[in-house]
Amino acid sequence: MTEMMSFRDGRIGARGTQVYRTPLSEPTRGQWNSIKHDMFGNWEDRLLSKFCKSVDSSLSARPPYCAGTCSIPPEKLVLFYGNDNSEISRIDLSSPTPQDLDSLSNACQPASFGANHEQVYDESYRKAREMNIASFATQFSARNAGLIHIVRRELLDRSDANRGIKAELYKLNVYGKDSFFKAHKDTPRHETMFGSLVVIFPTQHEGGEFVLREGDREWSLDFAKMLSDSCHRPCVGYVSFFSDVEHEVRKVTSDHRVTLTYKLYFIPESQAPVRTTSAPAPYEGSLATPLYKLLTDPTVLPKGGYLAFGLRRYYPVEKGTNVTNYKSCLKGTDAALGRVLTSLGVVWNVMVFYRNVGSYNDYLDEVIVDLSRAPYEIYDFDEAMRGTAVHVEFASIDGIPRVRRHPNAETPSRHFAKVTKVESLTCSRSPYVMTGQSRAEVGELTGEVCVIVELQEPAERVVRKVDSMEVMEVGA
């Protein structure tokens, strides 16, 4: 049974809470941001403990993709294509002629890309050709070629290695001379979609490097060279990556680059034919150690509260989404973090952190809130927040309040602190209008979706050790 967090002690009432401020000393939002910077400076760097940095380092180490080449029987590289208005054509992609590739390219349509929930054609951003799956047939199968097994082994953590994966063939793409696709991220089409798989056929071409970026890291894959240098003939190139990883196709300088694209989905456990349990990924031991030290340290949130870990993968959310549903759909290092927390026996969930709501109140909630439908009384958003919202006070990990409040303000009962410095890749934004007191204010409510650990006071904490924990000297 999934363990859910209890918020009995932190629920807000019908009237909610309110921050009282003296009109003569009230700073503007710009002044308040300046005050906060002067008060706290780069406070994350000063207050993150060694254990927090170790957690952050463990979660940042693994690259977000896998790539290589794979030998294929020649007959699997034959492709048939056509439509209702043309004859069926055949091309052998293991040894195509330039004329064969020109004919395939001419049978395709200009390639589009997604922007603001619409398909857009703009050759200054993407210049390529594409063919929908209804217009071609191929004997190539990513699953039969062993690529899904490779994705499980090299992209996913070991504990996800036996999860059911659906590989949905999406499109065929042809990049001719001077074709390219500028940096972009794929749009997840469902909450179970975790990544993409691109298969590169062994057609002769130059350029067209596949580049991936995450944070300040970059990887460039030259499949034209990888395929020509491979000792296994024929073969295809492949690259699989999480859907929130930025990637691009650099300009093809000669000939044709031909690819298949697959969308990758986790099959829900209720639909999976067999349920299995795998051993943890090797680096989870190095993650469990600093987490155990952090959660058992009595100086961490000494009055109890909530610890937050920013999500390192992107998950699609919209107004009304209950983000706790993502607890069973986390990907990569997010999933590894959840598994380690579970093994330590602590209560955790996926929640939304709303910072500086109304008069700089902060909240945790389970749902993406929409405040755009009606104006609300100025400096009091409490009644607009859901009944499941928890009023919290943003603090450092040692319980020092992050925001200075008026002496008459009602103080939240629980502190909220971020462990990892990384900002969550999954956020929500809702515009709002506040009225009252002879003035109005327009702003935007930002919610950051995080993994949240509910932490009791030190004497009441129960955190168990796990066998995979590595030895970590405190003074090292």
Image (cartoon, helix red, strand yellow):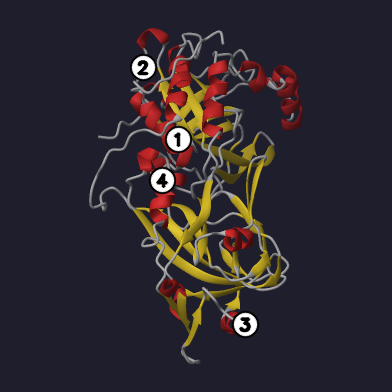
Q: Nearer the viewer, residue 467 or 126?
A: 467
Marks 1 and 3, Cα distance to the nearest angstrom? 51 Å
Depth check: give the residue in front, 189 or 256.
256
Amino acid identity at mark 1: Met
Kindly report the distance in space between the C-alpha atoms of the residues bearing marks 4 and 3.
Answer: 37 Å
Tell me the SS state at disc 3: helix
Label 2 vs 3, first from the N-terminus:
3
Point out the tag, 1 or 4, that comes first from the N-terminus.
4
Residue 415 marker: none
Badge 4 or badge 2: first in the primary sequence: 4
Ranked by sequence position, the earlier of labels 1 and 2 is 1
Q: Quadrant of residue 223?
A: bottom right
**Spot occupied by residue 78 in the image (x, y as percentages of width and height):** 45, 77
**Image location (x, y in percent) of residue 112:** 60, 70
Q: What residue is pinned by disc 3? A: 102
Q: Amino acid at mark 2?
A: Val
Residue 153: give its label.
4
Q: From the viewer's perspective, is the residue at label 4 or at label 2 nearer?
A: 4
Give the mark nearest the N terminus, 1 or 3: 3
Residue 13 visible, this orientation = no
Q: Nearer the viewer, residue 150 or 378?
A: 150
Quarter occupied by the C terminus? top right
